[in-house]
Amino acid sequence: MQADLLKRDLESLIHSLHDPKAHRAGHVWVRGEGALLFDADGKEYIDGLAGLWNVALGHGRRDLAEAARAQLETLAYASGYTGHSNERAIELAEKLARVTYPRINRFFFTSGGAEANESAIKFARSYWKLRGRPSKTKVISRELGYHGTTLAAMSATGIPGYWPLFEPRVPGFTHVPSPYPYRAQTTDGSAYGVTIANELEKAIVREGAETVAMFLAEPVIGVGGVVVPPDDYFPRVREICDRHEVLFAADEVITGFGRTGRWFALEHWGVAPDIVQFAKAITSGYFPLGGVGISDEIARALDEAQVPWMHAYTYSAHPTGCAVALRTLEIIEEEHLVAEAARKGARLIEALRAGLGQHPHVGEIRGKGFMCAIEFVKDRETKQPFPSEEPVVSRIHEQAQMRGLISRTRGDVFVLAPPFVTPDDLVDRIAEILKAATEAVLGR
Ligand SMILES: Cc1ncc(COP(=O)(O)O)c(C=O)c1O
């Protein structure tokens, strides 16, 4: 039955990251329940990535469906263009002002993460123009960063595989290295974060601070392989951005709303951004919604402007999306899911380390909160990666799927970000499956 659906699918759809070869062994999902997904053949899988890092509250929730239904019946849609608003959008913005960083109190809503990043870039450019600094337009982002695939977001994305078919990229975008502690070259581990942050300062000076609008970074790199920065990195980034009057925009599309064990991830390092982008978990994936929060200073510039801010989406502040988001945030609070994400993440990392920590091809098991990764290597001593023509981690993923676990990989890294509601026994099961899948491909 699934084979038949896949055949029809291949004849009728173009998919995100379209690749018919990879798709042939794909899944057609028909039902979800908590941390479990069921495919068209009735086979059950643990959803190791909570959909695409978004289904934080798990599948099949009546409370979220009810929030959507109630809003759809009352007012499914209303314009969010200036002169129009809706109650749910107002309530959601007020709620976000309470849970995001203290000086972020105004919000613009989008349909997802890439639109949030596009909007953040436009906020930064327009802010500087309104403040009489029109030459500040450039965007500095990071190698390994992922910000979505619309043209500006793609240009900010620092994973080159996303570029070739779509170039030229938008001009005025440059990349600096991300801290990658496992692959750090420095011997002085204590200053590693500062050393890498200083690359940002060099880039600002090289480009000319008068031309740089913003620095864009994920607090914990997600798609690029769950890379956690050292503690000294973001405090230094904040200092550098302040010194050179560059806005700091945090892409919290994955890390927002509890994934790392804090409501927003820069809280781990006592740092606040000027702009924050969010999406994914804000509706737990039950409705496409994202957005941008801006500092009081940026909001003031927009409020005082003599010209309208000509940026807009038909689905900005969608009442149904806002209703689902409000209910999602309430449930995160009611069920203490931020603390649960921290606890379950620690449990998962411990279980992975117990099972695979000594494996000769496991280089590192890392994570922050409930987003984790295993980086596989050909040689544990030298950290030498597997040659690119040896798709070892894809084979481990195949083996994991055969044992009932679905997630994603990037190069030699297997990433995990299960729903916050995953029961403890399934958290342990994820680690068991990965141990068995690894041993099936690479031996003990
Ligand atoms: C950090 C980050 N930013 C932006 C995006 C793009 O979001 P969307 O796919 O909703 O456009 C993603 C998607 O994975 C992401 O992980």
Image (tube, helix red, strand yellow):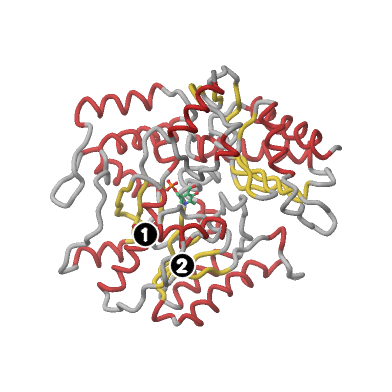
Amino acid under label 1?
Answer: Ala
Q: Considering depth in this image, is 223 or 253 the residue closer to the camera?
A: 223
Quote the CA–CA distance across marks 1 and 2: 11 Å
Secondary structure, mark 1, is helix
Q: Quadrant of residue 387?
A: bottom right
Asked whether, in this view, residue 241 is left or right of residue 143, the answer is left
State which quarter of the image contains the N terminus: top right
For the residues bearing labels 1 and 2, Cβ distance under 8 angstroms? no
Residue 280 visible (yes or no) = yes
Mark 2, other Cα within 10 Å: few <14 / some 14–19 / many ≥20: many
Respond yes or no on whether mark 1 lies under 8 Å from ligand 1.
no
Residue 333 visible (yes or no) = no
Asked whether, in this view, residue 88 is left or right of residue 164, the answer is left
State which quarter of the image contains the C terminus: top right
* Residue at image mark 2: 215
Q: Position of residue 272 (x, y in %)?
A: 45, 60
Mark 1, other Cα within 10 Å: few <14 / some 14–19 / many ≥20: many
Q: Position of residue 42 (x, y in %)?
A: 57, 17
Residue located at (32% from left, 63% from top): 123
* Residue at image mark 1: 120
Secondary structure, mark 2, is strand
Q: Position of residue 423 (x, y in %)?
A: 60, 26
Residue 49 sits above or below residue 159 on the image: above
Q: Considering depth in this image, is 217 or 437 the residue closer to the camera?
A: 437
Residue 2 sits above or below residue 397 on the image: above
Respond yes or no on whether mark 2 lies under 8 Å from ligand 1.
no
Q: Quadrant of residue 320?
A: top left
Q: Position of residue 110 (x, y in %)?
A: 32, 48
Amino acid under label 2?
Answer: Phe
